[in-house]
Every structure is written in structure tokens, then in C-alpha cells.
């Protein structure tokens, strides 16, 4: 639920995660000779207390003091707990005119939907009123973030009300630094810039199932493993900028690798559940935007976690 997602975590806590040695796109355990969607292994990545001096006041000289002199113990100041949200968590105003439950209809109400999604940080390609791929993906990402049981990508009554009445801009767990955060529990990806969540994308990560499949690049070879997106703190260590590429386990689009053969890459299928061999799938338009915006360059930290 939204309340659970508002918990804050400092990026310093990430270092407790171990970095698994991964072979292939998804495999924490690999019995084949393939290298998944790429060959290289990911490099390791590497209060002063101030005491106020007591006042030096002299007793009056015109008469003997009739009361005990004041004591000069240090004063302890206790700060009141904050009554506002942390700086990295932003309040937003509810919509004056609530959104309608438009399903997947295009038109003027879809323009308002797209504008609201962007205001909340869910990336859409444009605000042209066309209820296309990126609008469906953004709505699905919002539904996943909110913990709705059936994130369909369509605006039903529940989704319309939640979008209209939201008062806190959705945000990642990380509240400092610049990084990519992948929440496998919610199945969403956050772009965090200087502690602020700038954008959120719908993703599909590893489904956790074992696989045995032909190596697409080596005829006759078989790749076996488990479809796991490895948790931990990694970093973007290599990339392929040009179009589609035939990985060992299938086609991927403009990948940015962050551990072994595991990458964030474009795909033609980003469902509302984990479905990949271990990579982090995003839509093709979203992957183009990632490249064109420069938001995920080489050495960008990538924090993958289970949401717990």
C-alpha cells in the first residue's frame, strides 16, 4: 500500500547487500556454457557536543542575597519531532476535478490523466491524449506502486480515485544520492536524482523459475539456470546503444548491464508480474528515453531489493 511505500531508507544501508556472481541474464546457478545476454562479469564496486559556559554573574553588593544563588547547570535543548514530510518527499494537491474512470479511452480526459501521471512521477511519452503503450505502462506502474490486486493498465474507479486524491508524490526507498532503484516486490523502477524520485517505470524482473533453453547464439548448446534478478548494490558497467540484439536467451533492446549478463533493457512484453530470465524489462519507448535523456550513464548505481 502507499503508506508502506513511504518508508525512507538511506543509501548508506545498501552496502549490507552482497553482490552475487551471476552468469547470464538471470542465472544465480548456471549449468550451461552460455553467458545469457552478455559475457562480461560485473566489476565490484567498490556529533560534536557543544557545552555552553555558565553565566558569570556576581552577587549584588548592596545587600546580602535573600535567596540561594542560581545554579549554572547546562541547559539541554530537545528538538520537537518534525511535523512535515522530509525534503525528498513532496506533497501534491488533490485534483480539483477528479479523473473519470476512462478505461483505456483516448481523448481529452486521457490528456488530464497523462498530465497527472507526470505530476506524480510516472513517465509517459507525451500528453497527447492517445491512450497508447506508455500511458498503459504508467497506469500499471501506479497501480503496482499502490498495491492494487489487479494492475491492468486501465483506469477503473479505484485507480481514478487514487490518482485524483493522492497527496504525496510517490517515491523510492532511497532518500539520498543518484541511482536506479528496482523494487522487485512492487515490480517498478525508480530514477532517484539527488535523493528525489524523478521518474517511475513499470518493469518485469526475473520470475524465480528454473529454465533449460537453447542458446540463441550457439547452435546445439543448452543453457540452464534460475530466473533471478540479483538483489544488492550494483552499477552500470557496460551497454549496447544500437537497437535490438540477439541475446543468448532471446532478443533485448539497447541494454544497460549492471551485473554479469543482467541488464535493464527494452522489451515488447512487460506484464504485471515477474516474467524475465533475470533482466529488468521496460518498454521500448522507455528504453529510448533512458538513452536520450542520459539519466542512466555508465557507473550509475543500481540498487535491487525485494521491497522488505
Image (tube, rainbow, N blue to C red):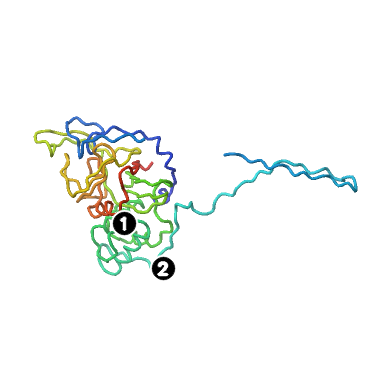
The residue at 30%/37% (across/down) is 230
Mark 1 or mark 2, whichever is nearer to me: 1
Using the image, tell me which numbered label, if any, was put on residue 96.
2
Residue count near mark 1 (Cα–Cα under 10 Å), binned few <14, some 14–19, many ≥20: many
Residue 56 location, x and y as percent?
77, 43
Closer to the camera in the image, 161 or 295: 295
Q: What secondary structure is marked by label 2?
A: loop
What is the quadrant of residue 156 in the picture?
bottom left
Closer to the camera in the image, 148 or 39: 39
Closer to the camera in the image, 99 or 45: 45
CA–CA distance in space, label 1 to label 2: 22 Å
Which residue sits furthest left? Answer: 220
Q: Earlier in the sequence, mark 1 or mark 2?
A: 2
Residue 256 location, x and y as percent?
26, 44
What is the quadrant of residue 129 in the picture?
bottom left
For mark 1, what is the residue?
123
The residue at 90%/47% (across/down) is 63
Residue 228 location, x and y as percent?
26, 38
Using the image, tell me which numbered label, if any, was put on residue 174.
none
Left or right side of 220 for 303: right
Residue 234 location, x and y as percent?
33, 39
Do the residues under discs 1 and 2 have CB atoms within 8 angstroms? no
Amino acid at each position: 500500500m502507499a503508506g508502506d511505500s513511504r518508508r525512507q531508507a538511506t543509501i548508506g544501508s545498501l552496502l549490507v547487500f552482497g553482490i552475487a556472481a551471476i552468469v547470464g541474464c538471470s542465472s544465480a546457478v548456471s549449468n550451461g556454457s552460455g553467458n545469457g545476454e552478455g559475457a562480461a562479469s560485473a566489476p565490484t564496486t567498490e556529533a560534536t557536543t557543544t557545552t555552553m559556559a555558565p553565566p558569570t554573574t556576581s552577587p549584588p553588593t548592596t545587600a546580602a542575597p535573600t535567596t540561594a544563588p542560581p545554579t549554572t547547570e547546562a541547559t539541554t535543548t530537545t528538538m520537537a519531532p518534525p511535523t512535515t514530510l522530509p525534503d525528498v518527499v513532496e506533497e501534491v494537491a488533490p485534483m480539483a476535478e477528479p479523473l473519470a474512470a476512462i478505461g483505456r479511452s483516448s481523448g481529452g480526459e486521457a490528456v488530464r490523466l497523462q498530465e497527472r501521471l507526470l505530476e506524480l512521477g510516472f513517465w509517459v511519452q507525451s500528453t497527447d491524449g492517445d491512450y497508447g503503450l506508455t500511458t498503459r505502462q504508467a497506469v500499471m506502474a501506479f497501480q503496482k506502486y499502490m498495491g492494487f490486486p489487479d494492475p491492468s493498465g486501465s483506469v477503473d474507479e479505484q485507480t481514478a480515485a487514487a490518482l485524483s486524491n493522492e497527496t504525496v508524490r510517490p517515491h523510492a526507498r532511497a532518500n539520498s544520492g543518484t541511482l536506479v532503484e528496482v523494487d522487485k516486490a512492487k515490480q517498478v523502477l525508480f530514477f532517484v536524482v539527488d535523493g528525489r524520485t524523478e521518474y517511475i517505470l513499470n518493469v518485469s524482473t526475473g520470475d524465480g523459475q528454473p529454465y533449460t533453453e537453447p542458446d540463441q547464439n550457439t547452435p546445439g548448446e543448452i543453457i540452464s539456470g534460475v530466473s533471478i534478478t540479483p538483489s544488492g548494490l550494483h552499477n552500470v558497467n557496460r551497454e549496447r546503444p544500437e537497437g535490438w540484439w540477439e541475446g543468448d536467451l532471446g532478443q533485448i533492446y539497447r541494454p544497460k548491464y549492471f551485473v554479469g549478463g543482467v541488464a535493464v533493457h527494452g522489451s515488447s512484453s512487460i506484464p504485471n508480474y515477474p516474467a524475465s530470465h533475470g533482466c529488468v524489462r521496460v518498454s521500448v519507448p522507455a528504453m529510448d528515453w533512458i538513452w536520450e535523456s542520459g539519466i542512466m550513464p555508465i557507473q550509475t548505481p543500481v540498487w535491487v531489493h525485494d521491497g522488505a
